[in-house]
Structure formats: C-alpha cells, structure tokens
Image (tube, grey):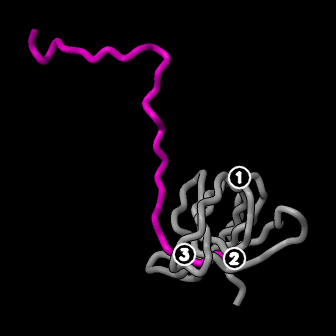
Amino acid sequence: MDAANTRLAIPIGTHAPKHERSFDLALPAFVQGQYPQSGTFSETAEIASLSAEEAVLRLKSPVTSGAKILLRLRIPPTRLLEAPLELSLSGMIRSVGSEMPGRGQRRLISVRLDRNFRIQPVAP
C-alpha cells in the first residue's frame, strides 16, 4: 500500500473540535453585577483572556456561577485606531476559581458572553 492511496477513516457524524481565537491580555475593565444574596457591585477588574464567546477576568467581588454581569472595556488608541473606544459586553458567569495568592484576594472568573455587544467612542 503506498502513501498516495492511504486514507484516514473518519466516522460519519463526527467533527473536529471548533477552536475559537482567544487573546491573552491584561486589559482593565469596569464590571457591574449582583451579589448572590442581594445588592449590586461594581469594581475595576483585569481581563486575562478574551474571545468571541468567553471572557476570563480577575474579580474581588464574591460572585457565583449563573450570575449576570456587565463588562466595559476601554480599548486604547493604536496606530490604526486613532481614538480610544469603549466595548460593552454582558454575560453569565460560567465558573468561579479559588482566591489567587498575591492578587489581593481576587478570583479567576470565566464568563460566557452574550452575542450582543456595543462599541462606542470614549467621550472626552
């Protein structure tokens, strides 16, 4: 059997896992949400990773899985982007990690992002 005639057998109905592009970055964000029992919170957090479907961030507030949060990211100007923009996202907390030592009691939070978002110029 030569290499030209060799075929890989792939069962019908199976798909290769879909990988979305994720960007590892350290970008400040303003986060708003609700505490598990009552009341709301808002704090400045740090985005650790961002993709089209998920945001991973470090958060001080004691949140739980299933809670809805709002994120506002300021995108700084670059050579191509002359003025800063604000990206507003929302989503549901998927998982909450344990406290991270040396990070000021912050937890690593994974957020499943909603499909809708808003980009607008930053007001001077």
Mark 2: which amino acid? Answer: Phe
Q: CA distance from mark 3 to mark 1?
A: 19 Å
Mark 3, Cα crowd under 10 Å, few <14 / some 14-19 / many 20+, is some
Element marked by disc 2: strand
Quadrant placement of the N terminus? top left
At x 9%, y 13%, the residue is 2
Is mark 3 in CB contact (under 8 Å) with mark 1? no
Q: Are marks 2 and 1 in contact (CB under 8 Å)?
A: no
Residue 26 in magenta? yes
Mark 2 near mark 3, Cβ–Cβ under 8 Å? no
- The kind of residue tagged 3 is Leu
Residue 88: horizontal and vertical position, in percent?
70, 67
- Say whether residue 9 is magenta: yes
The dot on residue 94 is none
- Report the span colored magenta: 1-30
- Whole-number angstrom distance, CA of label 2 to CA of label 1: 17 Å
Q: Amino acid at mark 1?
A: Asp
Residue 27 numbered tag = 3
Q: Is residue 25 left or right of residue 85?
A: left
Label number found at residue 114: 1
Say which label, 3 or 1, has the lower sequence index: 3
- Residue at image position (78%, 57%) is 67
Q: CA distance from mark 2 to mark 3?
A: 10 Å
Circle 2 residue: 30
Q: Position of residue 77 (x, y in %)?
A: 52, 81
Q: Position of residue 122 (x, y in %)?
A: 68, 82
